[in-house]
Image (cartoon, helix red, strand yellow):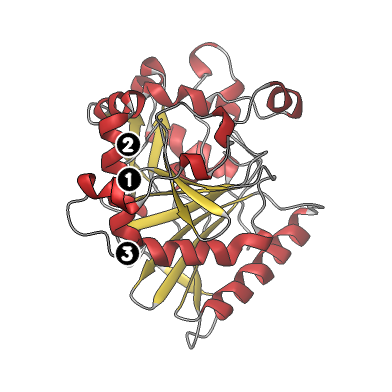
Amino acid sequence: MTWESRFINDDALAAYAAQPITDFPTRVAALINQQLATWPQLGKATEALSQVQYKELTVKGSRMLAQFNPARIVSTAAKVDTASIQARPCFLCAENFPTEEKSVPFGDHYVVLCNPFPVLKDHLVISEREHTPQAIAPRFEDLLDLTAALGSQYFTLYNGPSCGASAPDHHHFQACNRAGIPLFDEVSHWPRTPLSSPTELDAYSLDGYGLKILVASSAKKDTITAWFHETVFDIAKATAATAEPLLNLIVTHDPHCWTVYLFPRKQHRPSCYYAQGDNKLTVSPAGIDLTGILVVPDLNHFARLTATDVERIYAEITLDLK
């Protein structure tokens, strides 16, 4: 099975387009409509998403939404050890897709897919065509290009191979609609510590925020790329990492400016994930969870989750570099 056989062209998408397909965002919007109409699994999952429950919590003065989403148990409880990965077929390789799953290309190396287990509206997976391990260093500029191409309606994300990626053996990004994300609503007015002189680059950390986060904005791709690689080097040095340090990325693009939200990590999963009895909470935070939408696939655990639990979870998994 080749990727070309999985592509759907503009002529076939035209019937599902709300407007003429003239650019990448309109092509992606048509793909979403086509997949919803022709792929029953995605249609059911998207309908179920409209029925998920939310619980609002205040964590260190910050708004956070817990989301009860039982379909996400597939990702939250995913086994990502080497033996488990080697024992299952890769669900991001074209030959293992359901018949109905289609895609559109992005550049020469990526394909855009609809996520069959969505957390948010317009949840996409942007997958490398080749089966190659998850790694950000050689692909950070690809992530910037993707974010710019999707436009300001979307945010993109990268989960490190030990930080929430359920397919660490196959490189991929994700993208979702930006509407209603707590992080984006709060970041502009949260107290900050500057990490650079705001000329071509505005870099800072948030003071007292519920998560440890580094933020950088720039209109120049080479400037923000240089900041990213220098920062990852510093994280690797601080944590004695010999490979890619633990991290998650969120990226947005507004006219002529990228903003990168970098979350250094201590560990993949919090202690409550492994606990027993009433102390157990099936929570495994990845990039979306770090935007303030914490996914909980177990109804009992969702009901028991408190702001104190969430503060402890975020403190356990995110790393303060100060």
From where the camera sits, is residue 52 visible?
Answer: yes
Q: In the image, is 38 to the left or to the right of 146? A: left
- Total tally of numbered discs in the picture: 3
Q: In the image, is 83 to the left or to the right of 302? A: right
Quadrant of image for the C terminus = bottom right
Tag 1–tag 3 contact (CB < 8 Å): no
- Identity, as a three-letter code, of the amino acid under mark 1: Leu
Residue 187 is situated, as x and y percent measured from the top left of the image, at 36, 62
Residue 31 numbered mark, or none: 1
Residue 293 is situated, as x and y percent measured from the top left of the image, at 37, 41
Residue at image mark 2: 35
What residue is shown at x 74% (from left), y 58% (from top)? 236
Q: How crowded is mark 2: few (under 14 residues within 10 Å), some or many (20 or more)?
A: many
Q: Depth check: give the residue in front, 132 or 291.
A: 132
Residue 128 is situated, as x and y percent measured from the top left of the image, at 59, 49
Q: Residues within 10 Å of mark 3 (few under 14, many from 20)?
A: few
Q: How far apart are marks 2 and 3 (CA)?
A: 19 Å
- Identity, as a three-letter code, of the amino acid under mark 3: Asp
Residue at image mark 3: 23
Residue 29 is situated, as x and y percent measured from the top left of the image, at 28, 50
